[in-house]
Image (cartoon, rainbow, N blue to C red):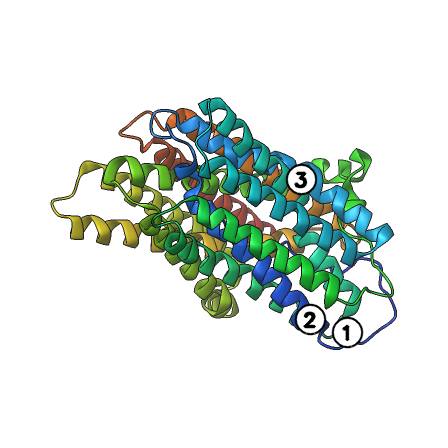
Amino acid sequence: MSDPQLPTPDPRLPTLDPIEPPKRALFTIFFIVFIDLLGFGIIIPLLPFYIHDAAENPMKVTLLFSIYSICQFIGAPVLGLISDRHGRKPVLAFSQAGSALGYALLGIATQFHWAGVSTALVLIYLSRIIDGFTGGNISTAQAYISDVTTQQNRSRGMGLLGAAFGLGFSFGPFLGGVLGKNNVSLPAYAAGVMSTLAMLMSILLLVETPRRRPTEAGLWLHPSRFAPILRDGMLMQLLLISFVSMAAFVMMEATSGLYLIKHYGFQPQQVGWFFGYIGLVIVVVQGGFIRHIVKRRGDWPAAVWGPVLVAIGMLGYASTAFKPGSHALFLVMLFGAGAINAVGRSCQQPTLSSIISRFSRPGEQGVVFGFYHGMGSIARIIGPLIAGVAFAYCRNTLPFILAAVGALACAVWMATLRRRQGMEANA
């Protein structure tokens, strides 16, 4: 149920002379990213099944999310900077090889019966560490598209990358559910095969870019670069809203599968299909529906009402703990809450990014969005840890309740900022 939202590209990065993309370059990178993220999506819903005592120790599950995010937070900027110097193609191939190794190790850890339970647990965590450090390649793929496109055709390239991102997260969980029905190790191996295929496509089909624009990572890593952001009250509040929103989302993401297993005995196939359904809703909304809303109403209404829908969805999840009268009613409540949550998240995230971009100074867009995505990564570290502690309370629904409170706080916060902006505009 990971949020299929790409980083917002900075249109003000240093400009190269107009060039035409190498033949079939955009579609090649589309298929590479799609296959790569298809493998990633396969295992996300199944992480609770890899921990033998997940129901009694939810923190072991949520740590899998946090550890991956910590490693990706460290690894992604490093990969970006290396790709600036040594090329996009070798970095993409290296990162996909690392992901393949991590998935293979996850399959080995869960397939065999080890003498000690701790051995399997260490191998599982090690697999997520490897994949986290090497798997932060989306920014490199985005940089590749920036290298081979002009201002005129860049939006098409980024649209293809966004489609690959969303489709991988939508179909991956469905496939993971099917493959994991009888053997939870099989999806891990399948994900490894996907990453290996992506690596081979990068090596054999991808054309190295002749010129490279610097990635956003290089524009914000030094603390002195984001000092002006901290002094901008409006911009900093928007960034904090994005941080709270992401933390709320990942609290649900890290524990919803565990909750469905513990309370309703969901099997890998059912969990995978539910996650895939949520991903499909997000893709549909972000792929077209949100554009019509923004065109008619602007960004602010969606950014305000989106988190309200998220909160309603979170409370809908929590309501299923009270054992509805029939299994059919439970499924209606569950899938209805999931859809509402996904629609709200899909309305809020891209419009909030757009508003942040509008309040960023022309020469600081790369720094602002580097800081924005850095804060998002930290939220993906902290959110699962809070959820792991809270899972034991309120019939295992406290993570959803806390997420709902956080989402409502963001809605009120955004409404206050919108009102202030209106007052200043009329002053």
Q: 10 Å neighbourhood of mark 1: few (<14), some, or many (≥20)? A: some
Q: Secondary structure at mark 2?
A: helix
Q: 10 Å neighbourhood of mark 2: few (<14), some, or many (≥20)? A: many
Q: CA distance from mark 1 to mark 2?
A: 7 Å
Residue 229 image position (x, y, % from top left): 72, 40
Amino acid type, mark 1: Pro
Which mark, by number, is residue 133? 3
Q: CA distance from mark 3 to mark 2?
A: 25 Å
Foreground pick, 427 / 41: 41
Horizontal side of residue 376 vs 251, given as left or right = right
1 vs 3, front mark: 3
Which mark, by number, is residue 21? 1
Asked if the residue under mark 2 is in contact with the one under mark 3, i.e. CB atoms within 8 Å, the reply is no
Most distant residue in the left direction = 325
Which mark, by number, is residue 26? 2
Of the image marks 1 and 2, the number of the one nearer the N terminus: 1
Amino acid type, mark 3: Phe
Quadrant of the image occupied by residue 230: top right
